[in-house]
Image (cartoon, grey):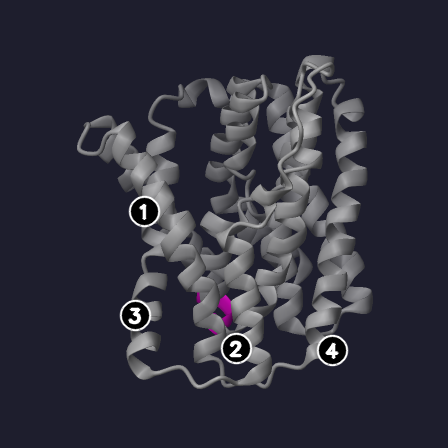
Amino acid sequence: MLLLQQMIVLFILMILGYFLRKTEKITETTCKSLSWMVVNVANPALIISGSISSERQVVGEELMKTMGIAIALFAGLILLSLLIPVILRVQKQSAGVYKVMTIFSNIGFMGFPLISALYGSESLVYASLFLIPFNLLIYTYGILAMKTKKDEKEKIDFKKALNIGVFSCIVSIIISLTHITVPDFAKTTVMNLSNLTAPLSMMVIGASMANIDLKKLFTDVRLLLFSALKLIVIPVLGLLLMKIWIQDEILLGICMVMLATPVASMSAMLAQQYDGDYELASKGVALTTILSVVTMPLVSLITGI
């Protein structure tokens, strides 16, 4: 199975990053620099690479349909985020972390490299549309849910939602719809940079786990139950429902990756910045990332996608 093979490759890269950090071959400062490079250079290049290498005719109607699906998907996840803390009987101070972890998956560091490997770089034109609601929500609803000091008067900065990820998505759409001819040297540069995304992102994820007691991850029963809901139950039920209305196999595959990828690393960053339960968020990112190596192929097998 191609998905299983890809997950094994990503897992090996993650383990490499973990041991490099454990042996101090890369430092915390190095990890921050590599993370910046992925977010601001490699990942945007990966998104744009889909439009400059695609031979598939992109239709505006298809893009609108995909955006509608993306909005519906996130709307459904928001509703589920309100229920899961109740179902798991989460304490009030940790409820915001569970809400954020339910909604936001690691589509940038893990999702896009997987989609590119599974369905070709041209599929990224459609996958990138999920970034728009993702960014708008994580810097609005995500911050509000994570805050523990509800009397804070800090204003939400909507400018953060208009970051380089969204900008690269817009550039990709424009190139796809206008069929702009991109010079060969520019194509080669973008493609080379895009190839950095998977190895760098997974090594950074692995390195971020070096300070976590991995043994304790598998003794947190509530977090294990959440992981089962996040990685198996929600993706399987969501995809079976989507198959009723969506016939395009590539679009279904994109939705599968968007739903079944582990908790976004941004969850831990928001928790740290807005006084959420940072330890819980870090454990959630680590545990779901490790388990996703098995759960993603399982979701694909169950749903037939």
Distance in Å between CA atoms under marks 1 and 2: 32 Å
Q: What amino acid is found at the position of numbered circle 4 in the picture?
A: Glu
At 44% from the left edge and 52% from the top edge, which residue is drawn? 7
Instruction: Report the residue marked by disc 1.
Output: 13
Q: Is residue 124 visible?
A: no
Query: Residue 178 location, x and y as percent?
Result: 57, 83
Say what secondary structure mark 1 lies in.
helix
What label does residue 222 carry, if any? none
Q: Which residue is mark 4?
A: 61
Mark 1 vs 2, N-terminal side: 1
Q: Position of residue 295 (x, y in %)?
A: 56, 45
Q: Position of residue 135 (x, y in %)?
A: 61, 47
The secondary structure that dominates the magenta segment is helix
Q: Which residue is mark 3?
A: 189
Residue 271 in sight from this viewpoint: yes
The CA span between labels 4 and 3 is: 30 Å
Q: Which residues are magenta?
A: 117-121
